[in-house]
Image (tube, rainbow, N blue to C red):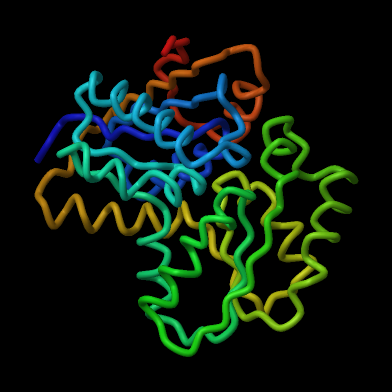
Amino acid sequence: MNKQPIGMFDSGVGGLTVFSEVIKCLPNEDIIYLGDTKNFPYGSKSKEAIIELSKKCVDFLISKNVKLIIIACGTATSQSLEELRKIYNIPIIGIIEPTIEYLKKKDVKNVGIIATQGTIKSNSWENNIKKSMKNVNVYNKACSLLAPMAEEGWVNNDVAYYTIKEYMKDFNNIDTLILGCTHYPLFKDLIKEELGENVDIVNTGEKLAKYLKKYLTKNNIENVNKEPKYNLYLTDTECNFINVANKLIQNNKIEKISKVNF
């Protein structure tokens, strides 16, 4: 057993889709969440910039005595995870590895990936999938408008509907679609409406949460806290984060939302 909290970071509100899955799967864990809202979006930044921002996030979470760190961000996972693991001794888990572990158990042939421009440009998803699985066709598409729309709370209006319709028109023959940015599960219903029931829409936060549960159990570092605490930190509070957060985490106790300066 380990009573230290789990650390988690993202560039904004998208990581709360991971947060919400983790607290469902691991209801006894304390969590410290850092939203780097001041530097949103990560998706359009250089790899070097994302690594530096990710290091600052990791340093902050380590200062809060976390036992491990979740990169609840597709862009930061694809661009900085490998480098972070070289620098820090603390366990760091991103969204790609748990998702591929899930895919390996399925009979997938044609996989679509939607993510930010930076993630798609890195080819991390495609490279990791093809390294682990043979005879899989991968179709990538950058959907740069979706993360900013999610930050505004535009996830089920006409703008969202027509944007999703435009982005999904190229995915005609896929059996699986990976939501490679943690903002994108907020659009899952609209995506499902476009692609139909036969396409498996993969919420990476859900796969990460299940992976994390096994990891904690295997390493005997799970918590049994009956009243977990959730502390949220933002690098800029002048944003729509709190409104979206309240919708995503309605029935769970947020201990506090504080501002932190890097």
Seen at 23% across and 19% down, the residue is 63
Question: Where residue 124 sits: x, y (%)?
Answer: 46, 60
In this image, 89 relative to 121: left or right?
left
Of residue 231 and residue 10, the one placed in the foreground of this image is: 10
In this image, 163 relative to 76: left or right?
right
Seen at 67% across and 32% down, the residue is 151
Which quadrant would the N terminus be assigned to in this image? top left
Please say if 243 is above or below 222.
above
Seen at 85% across and 60% down, the residue is 166
In this image, 109 relative to 1: left or right?
right
Q: Quadrant of residue 85?
A: top left
Question: Where residue 219 sits: x, y (%)?
Answer: 11, 52
In this image, 143 relative to 75: left or right?
right
Please say if 1 is above or below 4.
below
Question: Where residue 184 sits: x, y (%)?
Answer: 63, 50
Which quadrant would the C terminus be assigned to in this image? top left
Question: Where residue 5 sits: x, y (%)?
Answer: 24, 30
Seen at 31% across and 58% down, the residue is 211
Please say if 252 is above or below 203.
above
Total numbered circles: 0
Of residue 89 and residue 163, the one placed in the foreground of this image is: 89
